[in-house]
Each structure stands twice: as C-alpha cells, then as structure tokens.
Image (cartoon, grey):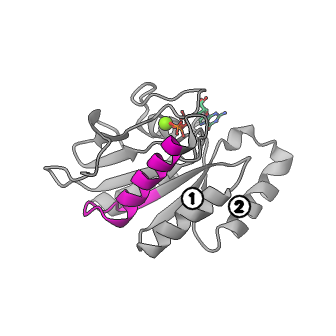
C-alpha cells in the first residue's frame, strides 16, 4: 500500500470514538512498551507521526491517524503499566474495554501488538477474551523479532502460535519494517 497521506486527526480520552466521516477504523492494542506507536510509524513510513518512547506509558490518549483519507489507524494507550499507579492502570484498561464492548464505531480489525521476546502475557490473554466475546476480528503481531537471535526465533514464534490458539500470528519488526506487507494485505482487504 502506498501511503499518500498520514495525519493526526484526533485524540480521545472519553467515550466517543465515532468520526463524522465514518471511515473504517483499524485498532492497535497491546501492553505498554510492546511497540504499538512504533509499528504505526513503521507502517506509515513516518518516523515521528506517533510519539514512541523508552519510557512505558507514553501514549495516554487513543489517537486517530487518518491514512490516505481512506481509513484510521488508532493508537491506544498500553495496558499493564503499573508505575503510573494501579488506579491509573485500571482506568486505561477500562477505557479499552469500553471501546471493545460498547462503542458503535467498531474496528475492522484489531492488531494486538506483543513483544515477540515476551510472548502473550496474562493481560494479553484477558484482552483477547474480551475481544473474542465481542466478536472482533483480531490478528496478533509479534513485534521486535529483530531482537530474537536466529537460533531462537522459530521456537519462540511457535510457542506464541500455540498460545494464540488458532488466531493468526504475524512476525514484525518496527525497526527493520519486516512484515509490513503482511499487515497491509490485511488492511487493504478490509478498507476497500
Ligand atoms: N528493536 C526494536 N525495538 C522496538 C521495536 N518496536 C518498538 N521498539 C522500541 O520499544 C520501545 C517502546 O515502543 P513504543 O512504540 O513507544 O511502545 P508502545 O506500545 O506504543 O508503548 P506505550 O505507548 O507506552 O503503550 C521504544 O524504545 C521503541 O524504540 C522493534 O520492532 N524492534
Ligand atoms: Mg505508544
């Protein structure tokens, strides 16, 4: 997919995820620091479209990025980051659950971003459960594969695939952009 335009459209902290243009939404969820913002930068080829950071908890709003005036990529705050306090963490999780359960702006697909080295955590599995209960389409993106040594990569991915229980798992690196076409193939089919 050729990216002709990528623009920040709006940040949401409340409950309203609808947009006037009703363009399809593609959501990126995942643990704090898994690389959601970096994956969006990598996909759009814009280094600083989305702020990514070494400090977990960087993204605090759900941010809408309009791509080619055709669809939105939604960068969500990460879950599972405790340093900001348990209350704050729970607030984030609640907000994400709200999007998954009650919003009428249903995402065409959710990319659940995980750190390939870490695999699926309990919180990811909990999130997948809510996603499943609400009949959303979800694809797991095992990000940061550049950090896996070649000798361990195959086994690590196989263990994620087995944890994923039949869900599609894509290998990705926001650093090398490996896997970009696989993600775009999925998006293209959903937004045309
Ligand atoms: N080596 C490597 N590092 C990555 C990759 N993706 C992200 N990172 C690094 O991981 C850190 C976190 O990336 P972010 O994109 O900010 O993560 P996030 O999931 O948006 O984090 P929150 O906004 O806190 O939820 C940054 O230091 C990134 O440079 C990758 O594919 N490979
Ligand atoms: Mg982020």
Name the residue nearer the viewer: 23 or 192. 23
Name the residue nearer the viewer: 45 or 121. 121
- The answer to whether the residue bearing label 2 lies less than 8 angstroms from the nearest atom of ligand 1 is no
Residue 8 in picture, x, y percent from top left: 29, 33
122 displayed left or right of 8? right
Residue 95 in picture, x, y percent from top left: 40, 52
Looking at the rendering, the stretch of residues picked out in magenta corresponds to 87-110
From the image, tell me which residue sits under label 1.
140
Q: Residues within 10 Å of mark 2 (few under 14, many from 20)?
A: some
Name the residue nearer the viewer: 31 or 145. 31
Name the residue nearer the viewer: 1 or 50. 50
Compute the Cα span from label 1 to label 2: 9 Å
Task: Name the residue at 38% across, 38% down.
Answer: 61
- The answer to whether the residue bearing label 1 lies less than 8 angstroms from the nearest atom of ligand 1 is no
127 displayed left or right of 14? right
Q: Are marks 1 and 2 in contact (CB under 8 Å)?
A: yes
Quadrant in the picture for residue 190 = bottom left
Task: Name the residue at 53% across, 34% down.
Answer: 57
* Image position of 118 with respect to 41: above or below: below
The numbered dot on residue 160 is 2
Residue 88 magenta: yes
* Image position of 70 with respect to 105: above or below: above
Task: Name the residue at 54% across, 65% down.
Answer: 128
Asked if one can make out residue 150 in the rendered structure from this viewpoint, the answer is yes
């Amino acid at each position: 997919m050729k990216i002709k335009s990528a623009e920040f459209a709006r940040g949401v902290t409340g409950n309203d995820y609808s947009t006037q243009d009703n363009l399809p939404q593609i959501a990126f969820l995942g643990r704090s620091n898994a690389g959601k913002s970096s994956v969006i930068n990598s996909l759009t080829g814009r280094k600083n479209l989305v702020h990514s950071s070494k400090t977990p908890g960087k993204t605090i709003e759900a941010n809408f990025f309009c791509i080619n005036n055709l669809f939105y990529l939604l960068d969500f705050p990460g879950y599972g980051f405790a340093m900001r306090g348990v209350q704050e963490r729970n607030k984030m999780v609640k907000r994400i659950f709200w999007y998954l359960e009650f919003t009428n702006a249903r995402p065409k697909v959710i990319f659940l971003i995980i750190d390939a080295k870490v695999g699926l955590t309990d919180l990811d599995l909990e999130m997948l459960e809510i996603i499943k209960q609400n009949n959303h389409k979800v694809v797991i993106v095992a990000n940061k594969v550049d950090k896996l040594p070649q000798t361990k990569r195959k086994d690590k991915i196989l263990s994620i695939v087995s944890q994923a229980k039949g869900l599609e798992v894509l290998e990705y690196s926001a650093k090398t952009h490996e896997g970009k076409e696989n993600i775009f193939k999925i998006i293209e089919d959903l937004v045309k």
